[in-house]
Image (cartoon, rainbow, N blue to C red):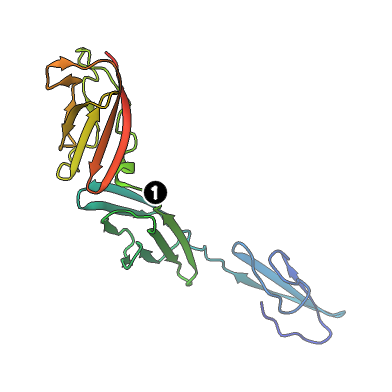
Amino acid sequence: LGAAAVSGLTYQWTPAVGLSNDTIANPLAAPEQTTTYILEASNPNCSGTDTVTVTVVEKASSDFTVELTPACEGVHAKFTNTTTDATQYFWDFGGEATSTDANPEHNYDVFDNNDTITLITINSLGCADTIRFDTSGIQLINIFPDSIPNIFTPNEDALNECFITGIGTAYDDCFYMIIYNRWGRKVFETDKSSDCWDGKINGKRNEDEGTYFYIIRIKEEEYHGFFQLIR
């Protein structure tokens, strides 16, 4: 705030909130919200007042969500920008890929441990805010962590009759699954992610109740797990 200091005058700013000194002619002002200040300058014989408004522009607050869609050629990422009070956007998807779109899309061959998604937003006054999303540990299978069941009941009641990954057809061209019983004997294999196992050997003899183990390969990635067969 600026007022020319005059010898013999005293100064009083109100409110004092956000001022470096409320009794000098030209204090520094840093209020947290838009504030109108009143300055009274006086000497023993007279006084005068004036006002000045300091407008606070909200800093951009960077945020986004991402929707991941799996496919054999990689992972398609669709970003939804939920930033507030921004006028400019700069995305860094890791590596050399960037974008200045508000809601960009990007294809990843595969997430690796070095990918960091960065969004920098800038408001109308040039103030910037940054948010980063570390993709460390994300693999294709993690996009649907709840889809692979841990139990199924092929008891001919028309409910939960088949063990199926729940992955759908997205990986049909790069998928392989093999299922073993507890003794390590192969009981089922398929190269279609939409196939299911009905708990039988060659569609005929029922397998026993118990724990079964699967190996799923999607491109170069391999995943291991187990489930219970209950009749």
Residue 87 coordinates in the image, percent (x, y)? 40, 66
In the rendered image, residue 67, in percent from the top left (x then y), is placed at: 31, 48
Classed neighbour count for the residue bearing mark 1: other residues with Cα under 10 Å, few (<14), some (14–19), many (≥20)? few
44 over 160 or under it: above or below? below
Q: In this view, does 10 lie above or below 109?
A: below
User: Can the viewer see residue 84 in this picture?
Assistant: no
- Viewer-closest of 216 and 192: 216
The structure residue drawn at horizontal position 42% and vertical position 55%, both measured from the top left corner, is 133
Res 94 quadrant in image = bottom left
Q: Three-letter amino acid code at disc 1? A: Gly
Secondary structure under the numbered disc 1 in the rendered image: loop
User: Residue at horizontal 18%, vertical 21%?
Assistant: 198
- Taking the spot 28% from the left edge, 43% from the top edge, the residue there is 222
Find residue 224 and report its horizontal and vertical position in percent.
Answer: 31, 36
Q: Nearer the viewer, residue 11 or 86?
A: 86
Residue 91 visible somewhere in the drawing: yes
Q: Is residue 198 above or below residue 29?
A: above
The quadrant of the rendering that contains the N terminus is bottom right
Q: Quadrant of the C terminus?
A: top left
- 194 left or right of 77 in image: left
Residue farthest right in this picture: 44
The residue lying toward the viewer, choosing from 213 and 69, is 213
The total of numbered circles placed on residues is 1
Report whether 224 appears left or right of 174.
right
Q: Which residue is drawn at 70% across and 63% down?
A: 17
Instruction: Name the residue nearer the viewer: 215 or 36.
Output: 215
For mark 1, what is the residue? Answer: 137
